[in-house]
């Protein structure tokens, strides 16, 4: 597992990139919420000792990813014919991507269970994007990470660079089958969601369930800007 220093990661994410930016609290220490206790981009929420910080959230038409060096057993991906290269993945017609960067930190003396994108069976819980309905589209939906189901499934894998810091997908940063974060360690990574092109930030919130059966073991971040 790759370990990240929280302060250096937050400092590196002092601004947000993307074709469309979901406003939040860039550069925040991650400890502040608004008057009613709602979390926004840049805020840290803690449940059962696990600190979870939503570092960034972008609305994009495309995502540029690079191969994971680990696949080759080297620090850098070798160049040459046939070697996967950095590439751009565009959303399909009428769709757009939501890219979030999330950090999980265990500052306790014991291993802690962690949620994972997609709610893998071995994990303590799951991380998903909740989309609120509207008058024209009254359906509330809990969205799992891409790849998405449908006639044209999308698979996006690799490393994403955000504000000069490169991240694995959170699934890889935590480990494919890792359900616990060791004491004193942190992991940060990106998650990709697929939504309709008409979806706006005020309809979206990121949810992390440590225990899907217990609402008190759940944290949420609004992706719209704080009113303060």
Image (tube, rainbow, N blue to C red):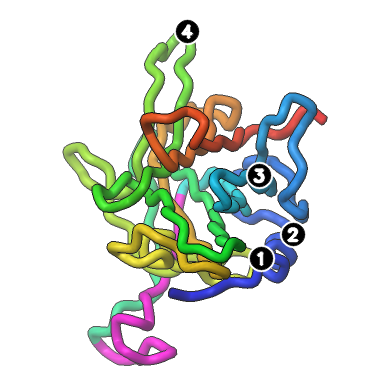
The percent position of residue 176, horizontal first and vertical second, equals 30, 64
Q: Earlier in the sequence, mark 1 or mark 3?
A: 1
Residue designated by label 1: 6
**How far apart in space, not on screen, are marks 4 and 1 (Cα)?**
41 Å
Q: Which sits in the foreground, 204 or 59?
A: 204
Which mark, residue 41? 3
Residue at the far right in the pictured view = 228
Q: Are marks 3 and 2 in contact (CB under 8 Å)?
A: no
Q: Earlier in the sequence, mark 3 or mark 2?
A: 2
**How far apart in space, not on screen, are marks 4 and 3 (Cα)?**
27 Å
Q: Is residue 56 left or right of residue 171?
A: right
Q: Nearer the viewer, mark 4 or mark 3?
A: 3
Q: Residue at x 59, y 37 (%)?
A: 221
Q: Nearer the viewer, mark 1 or mark 3?
A: 1
Is the magenta region chiefly helix, strand or loop? loop
* Quarter that holds the N terminus: bottom left
Q: Which sits in the foreground, 215 or 32?
A: 215
The percent position of residue 44, horizontal first and vertical second, equals 66, 48
Q: Earlier in the sequence, mark 4 or mark 1?
A: 1
**How far apart in space, not on screen, are marks 4 and 2 (Cα)?**
36 Å
Q: Nearer the viewer, mark 2 or mark 1?
A: 1
Residue designated by label 4: 135
**How far apart in space, not on screen, are marks 2 and 1 (Cα)?**
13 Å
Badge 3: residue crowd in 10 Å (few <14, some 14–19, many ≥20): many
Q: Earlier in the sequence, mark 2 or mark 1?
A: 1
Q: Is residue 211 left or right of residue 166?
A: left
Q: Which residues are magenta?
A: 62-81
Q: Is residue 53 left or right of residue 210?
A: right
């Amino acid at each position: 597992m790759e370990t990240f220093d929280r302060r250096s990661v937050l400092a590196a994410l002092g601004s947000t990139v993307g074709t469309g930016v979901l406003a939040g609290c860039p550069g925040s220490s991650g400890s502040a919420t608004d008057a009613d206790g709602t979390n926004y981009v840049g805020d840290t929420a803690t449940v059962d000792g696990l600190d979870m910080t939503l570092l960034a959230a972008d609305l994009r038409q495309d995502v540029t990813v690079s191969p994971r060096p680990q696949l080759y057993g080297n620090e850098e991906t070798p160049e040459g014919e046939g070697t996967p290269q950095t590439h751009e993945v565009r959303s399909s017609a009428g769709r757009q991507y939501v890219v979030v960067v999330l950090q999980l930190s265990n500052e306790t003396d014991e291993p802690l269970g962690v949620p994972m994108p997609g709610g893998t069976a071995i994990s303590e819980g799951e991380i998903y994007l909740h989309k609120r309905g509207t008058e024209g589209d009254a359906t509330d939906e809990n969205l799992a990470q891409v790849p998405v189901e449908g006639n044209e499934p999308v698979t996006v894998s690799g490393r994403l660079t955000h504000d000069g810091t490169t991240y694995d997908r959170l699934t890889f940063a935590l480990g494919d089958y890792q359900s616990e974060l060791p004491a004193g360690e942190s992991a940060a990574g990106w998650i990709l969601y697929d939504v309709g092109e008409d979806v706006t930030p005020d309809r979206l919130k990121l949810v992390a369930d440590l225990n899907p059966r217990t609402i008190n073991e759940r944290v949420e971040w609004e992706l719209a800007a704080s009113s303060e």
